[in-house]
Image (cartoon, rainbow, N blue to C red):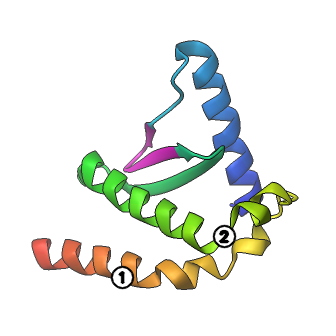
Amino acid sequence: MDDQLFGGLMSALNSFAEELVHKGLSNFELQDKRYTLLKQNSLLFIANSAKKIKEKKVMQEMLFIASKFFDLYSEDIMLNWDNDVSVFLNFEKEIEDSLEETIKKFQDAFW
């Protein structure tokens, strides 16, 4: 699915949930995946994981990634952002180690 389209869907779901419960949506499940949402500084961070991964662990990793994101991208960049996510394409390289380390830990625990 297109990144922009998926992001729009998640944003719409979160807005709907905020209207219903005044807190927003923290996670939801579709088939064998859990989608976890973290809202910080008006941005929505979304992670997917297997349902058997503890939500607390996913949230810890998301908080680390969000922190790294805000360290790399200044407030000035965010204030002038035109909602084009391609500006952040290089961020994947910045968190590659984090993603690989998480996968490795998971594999070590179960293989």
Q: Is residue 26 visible?
A: yes
Which of marks 1 and 2 precedes in the sequence?
2
Question: Left or right: 44 with respect to 101?
Answer: right
| Amino acid at the residue labelled 2 | Tyr
Instruction: List x then y, in percent, for residue 7.
Output: 69, 51
Please give the residue where the numbered disc 1 appears in the rendered image: 100
Look at discs 2 and 1 and give the one toward the viewer: 2
Pick the front one: 65 or 7: 65
Instruction: List x then y, in percent, for residue 107.
Output: 20, 77
Answer above or below: position of 7 versus 100.
above
**Mark on residue 73?**
2
At horizontal 70% and vertical 34% (from top left) the residue drawn is 12
Q: Are marks 2 and 1 in contact (CB under 8 Å)?
A: no
Pick the front one: 92 or 109: 92
Q: How crowded is mark 1: few (under 14 residues within 10 Å), some or many (20 or more)?
A: few
Verify whether residue 37 appears in magenta: yes
Magenta residues, start to end? 27-38
